[in-house]
Each structure stands twice: as C-alpha cells, then as structure tokens.
Amino acid sequence: MMGLYTLFYKEVLRFGKVLLQTLIAPIVTALLYLLVFGHVFGNRVQVFPGVSYTAFLIPGLVMMSLIQNAFANSSSSLIQSKVTGNLIFILLTPLSHLEFYLAFVLAACVRGMLVGAGVYLVGTLFVPLPIHHLGFILVFAFLSSAVLGAMGLIAGIWAEKFDQLAGFQNFIIVPLSFLSGVFYSIHSLPDFWQKLSRFNPFFYMIDGFRYGFFGAADIAPAFSLLIVVLALAVLTGISLLMLKTGYKLRD
C-alpha cells in the first residue's frame, strides 16, 4: 500500500500547495452565485413547501462546486504531467493500474469534498439548513466526487494539450453541471426538457444530495443512488482499461 499512499499523498500535496486557487476561489465563486440568485429570487420562488429558495440553492451549489473541482483535480494533474514529461516517473514505478486509478480518484474526492464542505459552511452563515438524512449527504458527496474524479482521469488521459482538456470541461462538464437542477427543480421545466434532464447524470447527484437535507426530491433518492453507482462503475471500467492498455500514456 506504500506506493498507493505515496501517489495519493503527492496528489493531495499538489492542490494543497495552491489553496487560494483550488479551495478559496471556488468557495468565493459559489458565494457570488448564492448572493446574486438568493437576492433576486429569495422571496419570489419556493420549490419545496416550507423551504426558501436560498436554502434550496445551497445544496445545489455545494454539489456543483464539488463535482467541478473533483474533475479539475485529476484531469489537470494528468495533463500537466503529460505536457511537462514527468509522467514517466509515475509509469516507471511498480504501481498497478488499479493503484494508479485509486490514488488519482481518491485525491480528487478529497479536493471535491473539501470545496463542498467550504461552500456548505459559508452558505449556512446566511441560511441554516436542516439535515434530514446525513447518510445520503455523505454517500452522494463521496460517490459524485469519485465519478467526476474518474471522468477527469479519462479526460486527462485522452487530452494531449491543455486546450483539449479545456474544451472537455467547458463543453461537457460545465453545461451538464449548470443544467442539472442546481438553480431550479426540473418540474418547473416543459415536458421535453424534463425528459432530457433525466439523461444528465449530474441531475441525479444533485437531486439525491438535496434529498439528504430536505427529505424532498424530484426523483426517488434510491433511483438516483443507483444511477450514480452505475455511472461510477462504467467510468471505473473505462479508466482501468485505458490505464491497463497504456492508451496515450506509453506512446
């Protein structure tokens, strides 16, 4: 386990050295969303009975920040190592592809959950949040960050330049996270867009996570949990296959 722990520790140190960029900046960004949307819609919109719009918004912002930063951690680390050429020093070590995967994904989980916790703590300064089911909150937070850590690993392996990775993030991750019910309930959408939202895996992450706070959700939380677990299983399989074959890593 020493090799796994060492690579994991290295990945945690990597984002720990620049906390202003990796932790403080996303918390401030989420706070700005909260201030703007909470001020504009706070007293005008109520999604769940007895839940203010600002309170409804906070879990969505927590999860959006979590998934975006979990993706950014594993993907940026890999592309930087590929571009600078120091990836060879990791590939030469006697680490299995499973240990490689676990180290990167677990480090992504740490960063994602730290950012999510920071956004939650700042948000509760404005609106106190109930906790209906702590288990759902923790499970969805961990599994969602693992899903995005695996997705970041895939994107980092696939990308050969920074602009390719930026395209993946700007045209896939960011739109899916913004259109996943962070700022609204899908029941407020026309039928076509409601059905389309159900094909967005990020929607199930946010909806199940929000259920942990309010005990209310657009979809049954057990079904959301199943979708997230399936997404993690599929992405894990793809990641391990790419690592085992050395796709774009051993060229």
Image: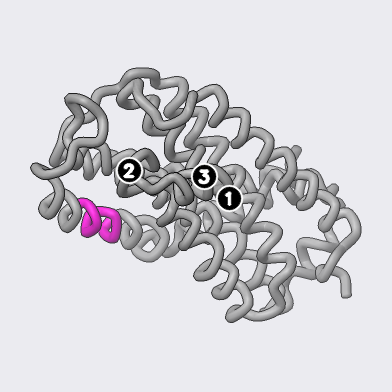
Task: Name the disc covering residue 195, or none.
Answer: 3
Q: Nearer the viewer, residue 250 or 53?
A: 53
Q: Residues within 10 Å of mark 2 (few under 14, many from 20)?
A: few
Queried whether the magenta region covers residue 155, the answer comes back as no
Q: Which residue is mark 1?
A: 148
Question: In which quadrant of the rendered view does residue 106 lie?
Answer: top right
Height in image: 45 above or below 90?
above
Height in image: 5 above or below 220?
below
Residue at left offset 32%, top offset 43%: 188
Residue at left offset 27%, top offset 42%: 58
Q: Which residue is mark 2?
A: 188
Q: Is residue 162 left or right of residue 66?
A: right
Q: Earlier in the sequence, mark 3 or mark 2?
A: 2
Residue at left offset 62%, top offset 58%: 152
Question: In which quadrant of the rendered view does residue 167 lie?
Answer: bottom right
Residue at left offset 32%, top offset 45%: 184
Q: Residue furthest front?
A: 191
Q: Secondary structure at mark 1?
A: helix
CA gap, disc 1 to disc 2? 27 Å
